Amino acid sequence: MKLTELIQKLNLSVRSAKGHLEREITGGYASDLLSDVLANCKEGNIWITLQIHQNIAAVASMKDLVGIILVNGREPEPETIEKAEAENIPVMVSELPTFELVGKLYNLGVSGLEE
Amino acid sequence: MRKVRADLHLHTCLSPCADTQMQATAIVEQAKKMGLDMIGICDHNSAENVTALVKAGARESLAVIPGMEVTSSEEVHILGLFDSETDLMLLQDMVYENLPGENSDEAFGPQYVIDEWDRIIGTNSKLLIGATLLTVEQIVDAIHERGGLAIAPHVDRERFSLIGQLGFIPKGLKLDALEVSTPSAASKKYDYPVICSSDAHFLEDIGRNPSCFMVEETSFHEIGKALRQELGRRVVSN
């Protein structure tokens, strides 16, 4: 599934890198510990977190992630948007809590395990 | 100049997760027994036992640096060390304004405020174990604006550490030092000065992982100079 499709189906608000929404999603990862994301998240994954610090953009860039979804309507810090724009990382906001959002992603066919 | 042994990150019975025996006279006694010249008092999100420890330390010629361990909104711990309790209390004001919640003794432990003779003079009802609404950057700036030193503690641990929570040290963060919990972690290369501390929550942990500084005297300003490597002051190996 492409990111654009996901944005539409989950009603996400895009906060950065609006020109980089065409990538294919390889899977999903949910974690708020950035050291854990660096260790375990895979290339092309969509990452679900509540962390809004600018380091999320750098982590997503280092791991070549498709994008970041912030839960509970949490807004990224201004520095995070700036950094995400520079790194072409789409940061999106969902009003849903993590549990609900991950459930919906799973039902849409996004898996946390490699096929 | 002389070599001083310091353990700059100790908790007291004010921290809900610390042992209730972490009282002024016992902490000072144990610090002296372990050969420390200097200690830092850094309770979670509060500094209400610093005065008791400064006074108890003065009785035994043990230098006590006023401090606090602030929890950021990202759940990262940041230590602030200060020259005076007045500067530290200004930080405490800001922390209290940004610290939601109320403590539960049963769930997290009691939060005793004591005097220099270990008499309980009150309890703190705030949720000191919780996170403030302040970001890492805001906390570091707030410490510096009040004349303090900002140190990222236990960066070699996963829980509540800057590197564990945020993956790596945010670029441009103006830390004065990093703290590690094990001597072996101190040999790793970082872009910041590295100190060792025990982060003691129990008496027997005090002085277990001390830092040594080559300085003129046991003061806050000398520690600052050592971290900046000014005028021959420096952090030295144990």
Image (cartoon, rainbow, N blue to C red):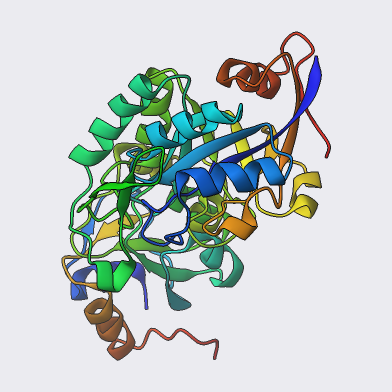
Residue B109 versus residue B51 in the image, above or below: below
The image shows residue B10 at horizontal and vertical percentages of: 53, 46
Is B179 on the left-hand or right-hand side of A26? right
**In-front residue for pair B119/B90:** B119
The image shows residue A10 at horizontal and vertical percentages of: 20, 73
Question: Number of marks in the image?
Answer: 0
Is A12 on the left-hand or right-hand side of B146? left
The image shows residue B193 at horizontal and vertical percentages of: 69, 32
Position of the C terminus of chain B, as image quadrant, is top right
Residue A87 versus residue A62 in the image, above or below: above
Can residue B175 be spotted in the picture? no
Can residue B90 be spotted in the picture? yes
Q: Residue at x 18, y 56 (%)?
A: B101
Q: Residue at x 51, y 57 (%)?
A: B201
Is B72 on the left-hand or right-hand side of B188? left
**In-front residue for pair B142/A44:** B142
**In-front residue for pair B61/B76:** B61
Residue B31 versus residue B85 in the image, above or below: below
Residue B141 versus residue A21 in the image, above or below: above
Q: Residue at x 71, y 49 (%)?
A: B209
Position of the N terminus of chain B, as image quadrant, is top right
Q: Quadrant of residue A86?
A: top left
The image shows residue B134 at horizontal and vertical percentages of: 30, 41
Q: Quadrant of residue A115?
A: bottom right
Q: Quadrant of residue B105?
A: bottom left
